[in-house]
Image: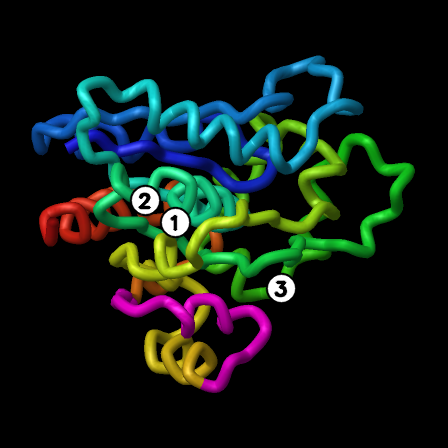
Amino acid sequence: MDIVLIPGFWLDASAWDGIVPALTAAGHSVHPVTLPGMTPGADLSGIHLEDHVKAVVGAIDAVGDGRPVVLVGHSAGGGLVYNAAGRRPGRVPRIVYVDSGPMAEGHAINPGLDPSVVAFDLPPWDGFGEADLTDLTDELRAAFRARALPQPGNTVREGHHHPEVDPADRRSIPATVITCEFPEAQVRELAGQGHPFFAELGACTEYEVVGLPTGHWPMFTRPADLADTILAAVDRD
């Protein structure tokens, strides 16, 4: 199976370095993606959310012969893979959300981010919740901050736009939600209640929730377990 890996904010393709070897050893072709603007010194002023969505679509299209592609999205990458899958529904047999989920039409990560912010830097650690930082040791925090890249501000405040296609095209794609910060039962409950953060997941027709208790960056805190959980999801198809 071809697996496309999309990182969350402040990270490039190297965020998946601790995951790729296990997926490759299992016989899969793995394609970690560095999104537009996520390189040192890049001009972020003209990078928009749609550029990131199109980069995921491009990664799907780059897999030849119409082969199926499993999309894996971490954090904000979850909204990207959901959006892209809706544009290539026949190519995507499963979406894997890593401490993330699908985002509905118009939803943004932080629509209130000041329009003057071109480069959104990784905040100080005290700007995160305790659950975010579970298992993220001082050593891991230092390594994360050393590799962190500014996030294009437009990708933070702009809302997702799903093209004029049948929503069922994306909502019917089987999904695995790897939840790290929230208990499995709570995610299912919130999705069923239509909570704003989980309403779009609740609209999806086939999804499972798998717990991997740790902080928001399991590729750093529990890489072997994350790789195993992704492999289990991929093997369902």
* Residue 119 percent location from the top left of the image: 77, 31
C-alpha gap between disc 2 and disc 3: 35 Å
> Is 32 in front, or is 129?
32
**Which residue is at a point 50% across and 73% down the rendered structure image?**
199
Going from the N terminus, do you reach mark 1 or mark 2 first? 2
In the rendered image, the vertical position of residue 176 relative to residue 34, given as above or below: below
What residue is pinned by disc 2?
A: 89
**Alpha-carbon neighbours of circle 1 within 10 Å: few (<14), some, or many (≥20)?**
many
Tell me the amino acid under the disc marked 2: Pro
SS label for mark 3: loop
Residue 30 seen in the figure: yes
Given this view, does label 2 or label 3 mark the residue nearer the observer?
A: 2
* Residue 201 percent location from the top left of the image: 42, 67
Tell me the amino acid under the disc marked 1: Pro
**Which residue is at a point 32% across and 48% down the rendered structure image?**
222
* Residue 94 percent location from the top left of the image: 25, 49
**Which residue is at a point 37% across and 32% down the rendered structure image?**
16
C-alpha gap between disc 1 and disc 2: 27 Å
The region drawn magenta spans 193-210
SS label for mark 2: helix
Going from the N terminus, do you reach mark 1 or mark 3 first? 3
Is residue 88 magenta-colored? Answer: no
What residue is pinned by disc 3?
A: 129
What residue is pinned by disc 1?
A: 218
SS label for mark 1: helix
Residue 220 seen in the figure: no
In the rendered image, the vertical position of residue 32 relative to residue 91, given as above or below: above
Going from the N terminus, do you reach mark 2 or mark 3 first? 2
C-alpha gap between disc 1 and disc 3: 15 Å
Direction right: furthest residue: 116
* Residue 54 percent location from the top left of the image: 52, 29
